[in-house]
Amino acid sequence: MPAGCRSVMKLLYRALLFILVASSVVHGAPPPEEVSGTLIFLESPDIAHLETQKLTTCLTWLVRELGLEGKDLPLIVVMHISERAGKAAGVAASSIRRNSSGNRGDVYYEFWIVGQGSAAVYAVNLEAVLERHFVLKLTDAEHADVLKRVVRMLNASVSVRKQ
């Protein structure tokens, strides 16, 4: 096997190992408004800590803005990885993926955050998950208004975290 292929295989192996073994799984604690869905967080060990509370708050505000209160939210697996790990895993930019075994109830979404996240990245991608899952039909203006309000609220909020 050529040396170049061997190094690519090593990187791929490390990325898979990270995803399967080295990741820490944390369930997002619902904010006071209580989101009825579940967020699962996986983090690469070589990236700064993910703001899990901010993501949970973002989802809560999106649910409220989109009028989805009381509906069962899909499972969303948030994978926060470094650019290096993203390159090894073939994920160049933050994105979402839908996964299913064929049954509607078996659907879950992957939200990949490559590099440092931001309020805009969180809002755009979580809104896309909700829009796709609930087959929402928003106009461009409605879409822009929802994202603008949620990003503004997230940027205005203060996160408190124990060191």
Image (cartoon, grey):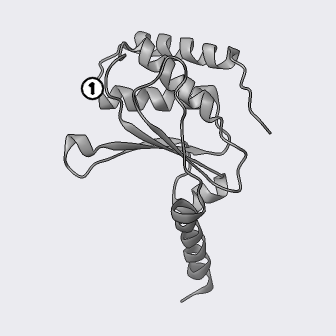
Residue at 72% x, 20% y is 158
Where residue 88 appears, as percent x and y from the top left, is 57, 63
Binning the other alpha carbons within 10 Å of mark 1 as few (below 14), some (14 to 19) or many (20 upward) gives: few
4 lies left or right of 144: right
Of 106 and 46, which appears nearest the observer? 106
Q: Is residue 146 above or below residue 79?
A: above
52 lies left or right of 74: right
Where residue 125 appears, as percent x and y from the top left, is 48, 32
Q: Residue furthest left?
A: 103
Q: In which quarter of the image is the C terminus?
A: top right
Residue 138 sits in which quadrant? top left
Of 73 and 83, which appears nearest the observer? 73
Q: Is residue 32 above or below residue 9?
A: above
Q: In this view, does 92 lie above or below 60?
A: below
Count of residue discs = 1
The amino acid beneath tag 1 is Val
Where residue 35 appears, as percent x and y from the top left, is 45, 24
Residue at 39% x, 15% y is 66
Where residue 107 appears, as percent x and y from the top left, is 29, 43
Q: Which residue lies furthest to the right in this view?
A: 163
51 lies left or right of 127: right
Residue 22 sits in which quadrant? bottom right
Residue at 44% x, 13% y is 64
Q: Is residue 155 above or below residue 45?
A: above
Of 1 and 131, which appears nearest the observer? 131
Residue with the mark numbered 1: 135
Residue at 55% x, 65% y is 21
